[in-house]
Image (cartoon, rainbow, N blue to C red):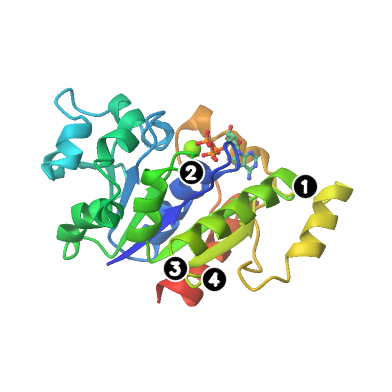
Amino acid sequence: MKILAVYSSKGGVGKTATSVNLAYTAVQTGQRVLLCDMDSQGAASYYYRIKPKKKFNRSRLLSGSYYQFIRGTDYPGLDLLPAHFSFRNLDIALKNGENKKNRKILYGLLKPLESEYDIIILDCPPNLTLLSENIITAADCVLTPVVPTTLSVLALSQLLKLFKKMDCGKRKILAFFSMVEGRKTMHRGVMQKYGKHPIFVKNYIPYNAEIEKMGLYRKPVGARGSSLSVGNSAYRKLWSEIQQRRLA
Ligand SMILES: Nc1ncnc2c1ncn2[C@@H]1O[C@H](COP(=O)(O)OP(=O)(O)OP(=O)(O)O)[C@@H](O)[C@H]1O
Ligand SMILES: [Mg+2]
């Protein structure tokens, strides 16, 4: 079982769009996939048309009694652990003292699923907290979307600092350019300047109307229309590169 966290401290950079579409892409390649919606906003759950059961909440997650709340999606092989509103305080709940072991709580919670899934994808909320440290510790790969603008690059440098603080170097981080608009000079400039850095993968996700419309259709782009569409092809290429570099 491999854990892929789609994470950035910056909001609105395409974390959820990426998690939702990579989960679908992974299941198309025959893998057993669990998508965990870690963000109390519940956007990934929304895209897959899943609401949490009434009895589900943060305490169920943290006590490890959450398995019964994992739901099947419309796509065989792809399950989803929905978000709950109470996840907004996961940070506070995780924090009891400065013990380093607090970083390993999430990993401990996911480990028992080892024989059930080939890949777990975490759709993460935008913050830089103890939850982020748990996510980074649990993940085999932290995939971070970078919109080619200066503020997104700043978020990436903060993430690298956090990795340093946590002593995990850069070995499990991969970055990709997200929502790329090739006609914008700034996008081209930022990609030229930073794209050669070894943490960046070659493939990127373009700004694409069909991805933007996912909120209307509530389906991953590959499940709608042609599997050869620009959006779906971009996620497939990204998935293949991430697998080769970190998840093989
Ligand atoms: N490649 C893309 N092209 C066009 N629109 C996109 C693309 N990726 C994401 N979007 C749109 O941009 C908005 C933000 O994307 P998304 O929700 O995936 O970001 P996020 O990083 O998960 O945000 P948050 O930090 O709030 O969780 C959404 O409306 C989404 O539909
Ligand atoms: Mg999101």
Residue at mark 2: 128
Say which of marks 2 and 1 sits in front: 2
Mark 2, residues whose alpha carbon is within 10 Å: few (<14), some, or many (≥20)? Answer: some
Q: Which label is found at residue 241? A: 4
Looking at the rendered structure, the kind of residue marked 4 is Glu
Real-space Cα distance between discs 2 and 1?
Answer: 27 Å
Real-space Cα distance between discs 2 and 3?
Answer: 16 Å
Mark 3, residues whose alpha carbon is within 10 Å: few (<14), some, or many (≥20)? Answer: some
Residue at mark 1: 181
Say which of marks 1 and 3 sits in front: 3
Quadrant location, the N terminus:
bottom left
Looking at the rendered structure, the kind of residue marked 2 is Leu
| 162 relative to 131 in the view: left or right | right
Name the residue: 68% across, 49% down. 154
Residue at mark 3: 168
Real-space Cα distance between discs 4 and 3?
Answer: 22 Å
Quadrant location, the C terminus:
bottom left
Looking at the rendered structure, the kind of residue marked 3 is Cys
